[in-house]
Amino acid sequence: MLSITYTVSSGLVENNLIQGVIFVATGTDLFNLAGRKALITGSSQGIGFALAEGMAAAGAHIILNGRNTSKLQSAADALAKQGATVSQLAFDATDSTAVSAAVDAFEAEHGAIDILINNAGMQHRTPLEDFPADKFELLLKTNITSVFLVGKAVANHMIKRGSGKIINIASVQTALARPGIAPYTATKGAVGNLTKGMATDWAKHGLQCNAIAPGYFDTPLNAALVADPEFSAWLEKRTPAGRWGNVDELVGAAIFLSSDASSFVNGHTLYVDGGITASL
């Protein structure tokens, strides 16, 4: 089994590593999330729920978030049946007051949120010249304002503790564009750059802030594209892996960025896209 020795030379490092102490962690230990609480926004379905399942299996206490309480309850019940430790935190991730109140209350009552995954997002497809102004504003609020608001609220507690993991869900559109989704592309480009900014400001406080950029995955957000044979045929030819991604294929990246294995990874966007950004 892989064995790695760490020497901690300065500062406070998460998981009870004290200055000057040498410890040994096995490969399995590096990815263990036991004892850590993970808040995942927009986690009642799709990518968010898949990440919740996977991180629960790695030992994390999952905090589900969404606005629809009935969908949250169904998701929580499903996780509980799998043996997960799960909580629910219903709030609108675009509402500054609601976000701060929910995060502060949870921390006060249940303890530290160790991991945040900013997953809440939406899509709207219309040619740019016809794109409705109200949909543009909604995309900005849902896809980028929520990352700022929830990230800030959770980071304020993480900074006091000197540790924390923040993962923002970006997109293949962080690097690429396609017709009809220019505003979405703009928001996901912003997520990538906000991630760099979070790392730049908060790494000195012991936080690791990174992003996962999924390629094309079979999710409710992409239902219209999955149902389009012409698009699916195009995607299979365009993607070196030759297929749509399955949401459980994002779990490994999330566990890595949530765990001690990524202790010196900061401001990075990890593309999980079957090679689509690597090829022409």
Image (spheres, rainbow, N blue to C red):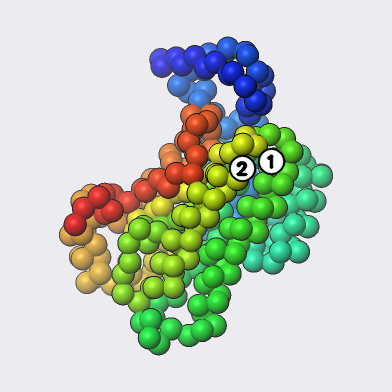
Q: Which residue is mark 1?
A: 158
The amino acid pointed to by label 1 is: Met
Give yes or no for contact between labels 2 and 1 (Cβ–Cβ under 8 Å): yes
The amino acid pointed to by label 2 is: Trp
Left or right of 110? Residue 204 is left
Query: Which residue is at a point 50% across and 31% down the rendered structure image?
Result: 264
Inter-mark Cα distance, 2 to 1: 9 Å
Q: Secondary structure at mark 1?
A: helix
Q: Position of residue 191 (x, y in %)?
A: 49, 58
Which circle, 2 or 1, is nearer the viewer?
2
Q: Quadrant of residue 13?
A: top right
Q: Nearer the viewer, residue 103 or 153?
A: 153
| Residue 242 visible | no
Q: Position of residue 280 (x, y in %)?
A: 19, 57
Q: Which residue is mark 2?
A: 202
Left or right of 279? Residue 191 is right
Left or right of 240? Residue 172 is right
Q: Is residue 222 above or below residue 195?
A: below
Q: Position of residue 123 (x, y in %)?
A: 46, 70
Q: Nearer the viewer, residue 232 or 26?
A: 26
Callout 1 environment at 10 Å: few (<14), some (14 to 19), or many (20+)?
A: many
Q: Is residue 208 above or below residue 224?
A: above
